Image: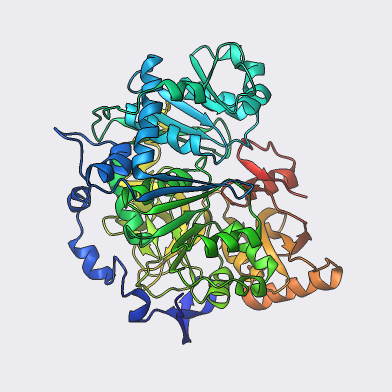
Amino acid sequence: MSDSEINARPAETATGAHELIKKRPRDYARANLTDYDVFARKFSWADARALLDGLSGGGLNIAYEAVDRHVAAGRGDKLALRWIGRDDRIQDFSYADLAKATSRFACVLETLGVAKGDCVFSLLGRVPELYIAALGTLKHGSVFSPLFSAFGPEPIKSRMTIGSAKVLVTSEALYRRKVEPWLKELSCLQHILLTECSGSPPPGAIDLKAALAKASDDFATVRTSGEDMALVHFTSGTTGKPKGAVHVHEAVVAHNITGRLALDLHADDIFWCTADPGWVTGTSYGIISPLTNGATLIVDQAEFEAARWYRILREQRVDVWYTAPTAIRMLMKTGTELAKCYQLPHLRFMASVGEPLNAEAVLWGVDAFGMPFHDNWWQTETGGIMIANFAAMDVKPGSMGKPLPGITAGIVERTPAGEVKELTQPMAMGELALRPGWPSMMRAYLNEDERYRKCFAGGWYLTGDLAMRDHDGYYWFVGRADDVIKSAGHLIGPFEVESALMEHPAVAEVGVIGIPDETAGEIVKAFVALKNGVEPNEALRKELLGHARKRLGPAIAPKEIIFRENLPKTRSGKIMRRLLKARELGLPEGDISTLESEER
């Protein structure tokens, strides 16, 4: 385990002074990227594509790059995936095992008459069949779309309707509870493949285990081009129906190289991405990226439990760990002492994604593990990591880092005439924008051409996120464009206020919104969840108000603080500010299908 130094001099940050985490050469001696500026100047996407094999005779297929090419190169015996059940039972898959299992699944699809380009949905927890179905579908040339097993019937039906689902892979229990009641309403669905059948499958369904047992393990990967549709990931808007972001097989170029650069993945690494594949991170970096890089992937079926997570890191000798801010904050709640009970000599790199990582959480990583968490930024629409803190780069706590080589980022503002103007002065607040053209960029929103076109203007992809770039080229998240609070002429980013409150030792989580005010237009209201063992009271509320005023000044600090036991979050860990605001103001809640952790 590394022992990164914290430089004594403060670093300029978007939310004030925090200590710079200065990397030493020995911290990144094995890093794939050791000199950011040099690598970025020389980088080309053509060179990144050349790291992959491609299909014999031309074409590109994600499953082939993730699995079969390793077998063809004589690396079939290498451990590809280790699955850990809730009961600690372990099931191992070598690359050769995965190649055979995914071929059987592809053969099942072929036998059923599923065509290239047809959409196969999964509704499963983190079980081996999910990973086999994902890769087997891609090998078959069909399109894979994962759904969270926690979704209720309506979100499942709406997404499968938008995606014109031909096949659903799910468990018997999930099928009977969440699909069977409305099945007749979805005429496009032709085949239901069930895992964990208790007996004879329900009418019209197929026992997947029995079907796989009969299928051949010899299947030639269907020839797909880089621009053939491969994945559909659904993302929720603030209103209206969910958006189906389309990604193509060419995305594997970005999945592979960003894993090497942003996560510092090596072929001999043991890698644990804690994300569920129902979230884009759990597919891009919980399946594709580590396997294309030849690493060993750890999958844990169980939900979060701090001691279990530390035990997995230790017993599985995890080298690279990719998790979410919500999980990090829950670990922080349990205290540094618990973390230090576990010796983790193999752990080399820790990264986080899902929402901005507060500076305090980055610094807690140094205290608890001897190294920082490296925050990075991307979206369902970008398909892969776009901005990151790299292994060889000094960390400014609270910053999301610098753009990946091959990615051109900028800060822009939209003019009244509908044009886009780039803002070049340091720390100017504007919309984060990317120049299109990277391989994992979404190619469409399913059946919504106009909604897709609105994402682009003036030669930029407009992310909808507000950010700033400092004089060193580090990017700082401010908030979603529709989350920004306008108070007495000030533009206030909720993340700035949340970060300041997070610095208080009693605070575990914060969500900040603007509420109407006759004089100021809006005032800042904060919803605060406290750490375990801390009791909410009026004295603490006043103390937090004073802390925020001292840290931020009276113009930006919250005027109101409300204590909550828990804040509403998506499964990916994002605090749902829009839901807090809707409930506060009595407005429609919009799409809450991704709500995982309810407010209380």
Q: Could you tell me residue 23's position as x and y percent? A: 39, 79
Tell me: 74 left or right of 513. left
The reply to whether residue 490 is in sight is: no
Q: Residue at x 25, y 69 (%)?
A: 37
Q: What is the number of callouts on the image? A: 0
Which of 77 and 417 lies nearest the eye of the viewer? Answer: 77
Q: Could you tell me residue 5's position as x and y percent? A: 45, 83
Q: Residue at x 29, y 30 (%)?
A: 228
Q: Could you tell me residue 306's position as x and y percent? A: 65, 61
The reply to whether residue 356 is in sight is: yes
Q: Residue at x 60, y 15 (%)?
A: 183
Q: Is residue 452 above or below residue 597?
A: above
Q: Is residue 306 above or below residue 152?
A: below
Q: Residue at x 65, y 44 (%)?
A: 596
Q: Quadrant of residue 486?
A: bottom right
Q: Residue furthest right?
A: 538
